[in-house]
Image (cartoon, rainbow, N blue to C red):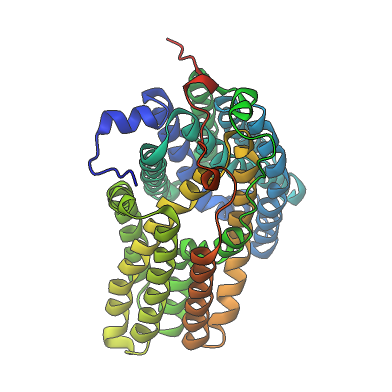
Amino acid sequence: MATTTEIRPRALVRASGGPRYAVALAVDALGTGLLRPFLLLYGVMALRLSAPVTGIAMTVGVVMGLVCVPAVGRWLDRGARSTVVAASMLVRVAGVALLLATPTGNVWLFATAALFLGIGNHAWPAAHAALVATVAHGRERDAALAGGRALRNAGLGAGALLATACLVGGTTALQALAAVTGLAYLAAAALAWSVRVHAHPAAAAAKSRDDEPAPRMRALLAANVIYVFCLNVPEIALPLVLVTQMHASPVWSAAIFVANTVLVVTLQVPVTVLMSRFSRRTALALSGVVLAASYLGLLAATSLGHGWGAPAVAAVSVVCTIGEIIYAGSATALVTALTPAHLLGRALARFQLSTGFGLAVSPAVITALASHGSAALWGGLSAATLLSASAVATEKDQGASRAGLPAGGTGKAGVRVRRGG
């Protein structure tokens, strides 16, 4: 089995789409970090909507945005790559423009803006993964996907910190942040489009067997719905438990969130490279075991009471973040490795649907479980994650990987890369 044992920054940037595309990702992430954490505040402070109404409008927008994902998959399977990435950014430009044009008290325009932002946020992961899978292959592709996630988290964190500093300006500052976000999305879209990456699905299909089926990945997709709960543990579960049940200072929640971001930025690529010693499926199953163990650790930590409980929760949250890093470095990589190149778009779209669904339902599930106590929350998450890891480990691979054919990329004959400038 091929492994990647060293990190070469230039090769990593090249495998991720090139320097110009890396800048596009950074600018896009910075813009998202400026607005996304404060979209609720924009509805409440700038538009004078009630918090429940604002929250419902945002949720509806995010959920309805999932409807576009299958169409994105079909578009990718026709060969589009950088064009789809740019389109996902331009859709968010439209969302920000609608946000700025929304008059005070108009919930419908706000919901429409949230819908456009949701469409862009759901379309981007599949489009980005398809582009990286087109220009890079094997374990180099896995490292490139990990590098993209690390860069994105760095941009999101920087944007959120900058926005927090600007919030002292009140409504005017929120509107300025929205405008800067729109400009950032527009610049990122121009940069991504200029990369000009396009695949030739017909050439890739000709290299594969005509009767080769699309991998169903039912167990993987179902398990992914549970796995993605880990992404909302630092943002929702831990603050909920620390503040409302343990009565700890909110500073602990903020510190855990910052530590999570820093660890992802610094360790995502090295851990992904380290895990290349194992098969992607083994790594994904192992991430479930690590996450389940961290949930049990959090259950034990919350039982320590007010004095030692908060520090213990913070310490165990590091283990949860390691599990998240292993999951993020192996899940999308496994999908791209299992899927024939001419079917990659639809496979990534199905994976994004499972991710989006998990992210949409996890806040409600987490809060419902937490209302029944720590044992229900952490014990339930641990059991569900272990079951998911078992399903991932025992699922049989189909399609290209089983047949010994290239997967997750079109090869040099099936890719056209033209870089402007």
Residue 375: x %, y % from top left = 48, 88
* The one of 349 and 156 positioned closer to us in this rendering: 349
Task: Give the quadrant of residue 199.
Answer: top right
Q: Is residue 273 left or right of residue 159?
A: left
Identify the residue at horizontal 69%, vertical 51% (top origin): 61
Count of labels in the image: 0
Residue 151: x %, y % from top left = 37, 41
Identify the residue at horizontal 37%, vertical 41% (top origin): 139
Residue 360: x %, y % from top left = 62, 60
The single residue placed furthest to the right in the displayed view is 108
Identify the residue at horizontal 37%, vertical 61% (top origin): 257
Using the rendered image of the protein, determine whether residue 197 is visible from the camera's viewpoint. Answer: no
* The one of 37 and 400 positioned closer to us in this rendering: 400
The answer to whether residue 328 is above or below residue 411 is below
Q: Is residue 246 left or right of residue 74?
A: left
Q: Is residue 139 left or right of residue 88?
A: left
* The one of 403 and 298 positioned closer to us in this rendering: 403
Task: Give the quadrant of residue 421.
Answer: top left
The single residue placed furthest to the top in the displayed view is 421
The answer to whether residue 256 is above or below residue 270 is below
The answer to whether residue 308 is above or below residue 329 is below
Residue 87: x %, y % from top left = 62, 29
Task: Give the quadrant of residue 396.
Answer: bottom right
Using the rendered image of the protein, determine whether residue 300 is visible from the camera's viewpoint. Answer: yes
